[in-house]
Image (cartoon, grey):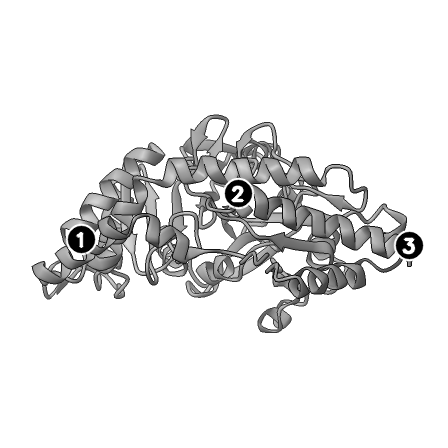
Amino acid sequence: MKVPFLDLKAQYHSIKKEIDDAVIGVFESTSFVLGKTVSDFEKRFADIHGVKHCVGVSSGTDGNHMALWALGVGPGDDVIVPANTFIATAWGATLCGAKPVFVDCHPESYNIDPEKVGPVITPRTKAIVAVHLYGQSADMDGISSQLSIMNFEVSEPGVFVNRKSGQKIFLVEDCAQSHIAEYNKKKVGGLSKASSFSFYPGKNLGAYGEAGAVATNDDDLARKFRMLRDHGAEEKYVHKSFGHNYRMEAVQGAVLGVKLGYLQSWTEARRKVAARYSDLLSDISEVVVPAEMPYAKHVYHLFVLRLNSRAPLIAKSGAEVRNDLQKFLNEREIATGLHYPLPLHLQPCFAHLGYRHGEFPVTEQLAELGLSLPMYPELSVEQTKYVSDTIHEFFTNRKSS
């Protein structure tokens, strides 16, 4: 049985007529950049997330940059970023000329560990980026509590001010992998001063190309977003600020508009797939299935299986076992992924920051022992069982050899 890591073709064929009609409508209108398909999508996406403004942009990476750029992050500033995330999160800081300051992830959620935030706050700290990774929200109250310990108080939603020095720190969300995920029964995206989303094709809500969005409840910030994405202009040829071309294409707005109507049902299907995996793999002591934190409603963009470092078989040579398991699955036509095999603090492009191996042990262990299994709404019961049975077979063989 063949099990792809992701099956976008199956998803397309399930909604083919609606997609084709929407795309042809764009071609017939000859309005190819922004326009009605994008504005209609922006409104619906904002409504679903309970946030006042959504501004469609050209990619999630561009959204990461815009969120910080609009908040005035620049040279001389530090931005706290989890080491366990895709590098696009860190580009938000670096493209503004700021310095990313990495921190370790939590051993259960794999998101930013709030207790690691306080010790790295300095007078240079301008923002904290909470990434809702793999489909699960970060511990937002935990981050707020750490800021409170450091003598910061909330001046407005997502903005913390030091009671003595007046230093201001913005809390920003990276929601690239967590469309309609929830934190304490509230949708992500409106839990901070600004948030960014990715609609890369493989995301839970994916475009047919590059696309993203930024969101906020602040009217003035939303106005800045719209100016920044369109060369700093509110009217043609009048550029009130620096900007860039970060506009969303109309075709992507049309595609996302159709797919948005299915996001809830696709998300529930993902949660059922995750529940099946967790149940079928629960008796293997060598693996740890993803934990859904009590404050979160996980949307399972990824199902990251972690080998159990406490199991005797894993303790001896964990990375080797993970790699052998991946090879074993791939040989049986089960596609897998690694998210992320080289943490951000060890990336060559950040060597100048001076981080060393061993500084963030939880992130580094996940990089060595994590394996992402196939995860998408159309994954059948039979396919899920085949994946799980194959993992059982691998460990049975390993123990007997």
Q: Amino acid at mark 2?
A: Tyr
Left or right: 37, with 29 as reference point: right
Left or right, 180 with respect to 83, comes to left
The picture places residue 295, in percent across and down from the top left corner, at: 56, 28
Q: Residues within 10 Å of mark 1 (few under 14, many from 20)?
A: some
Q: Residue at x 58, y 45 (%)?
A: 382
Say which residue appears at 78% left-offset and 55% top-offset: 394
Label 3: few (<14), some (14–19) or many (≥20) C-alpha neighbours in 10 Å? few
Relative to residue 320, is residue 362 depicted above or below?
above
Q: Does the residue at mark 1 contact the one at mark 2 (Cβ under 8 Å)?
A: no
The kind of secondary structure element at disc 1 is: helix
Numbered label tally: 3
Mark 1 against mark 2, which lies toward the viewer? Answer: 1
Q: Nearer the viewer, mark 2 or mark 3?
A: 3
Quadrant (top left/top right/bottom left/bottom right) for the N terminus: bottom right
Viewer-nearest residue: 59 or 91: 59
Residue 400: assigned label: 3
Q: Is residue 294 visible?
A: yes
Residue 68 visible in the displayed image? no
Taking the spot 27% from the left edge, 65% from the top edge, the residue there is 244
Measured as percent of width and height from the top left, residue 196 is found at 39, 49
Reading the image, the residue beneath label 2 is 300
- The residue tagged 1 is 21
Q: Badge 2: how crowded within 10 Å, few (<14), some, or many (20+)? A: many
- Choose the circle earlier in sequence order: 2 or 3: 2
**What distance separates the C-alpha of mark 1 from that of mark 2?**
29 Å
Instruction: Tell me residue 328's x, y (percent).
Output: 72, 62
Three-letter amino acid code at the position of disc 3 = Ser
Q: Which image quarter is the C terminus in? A: bottom right
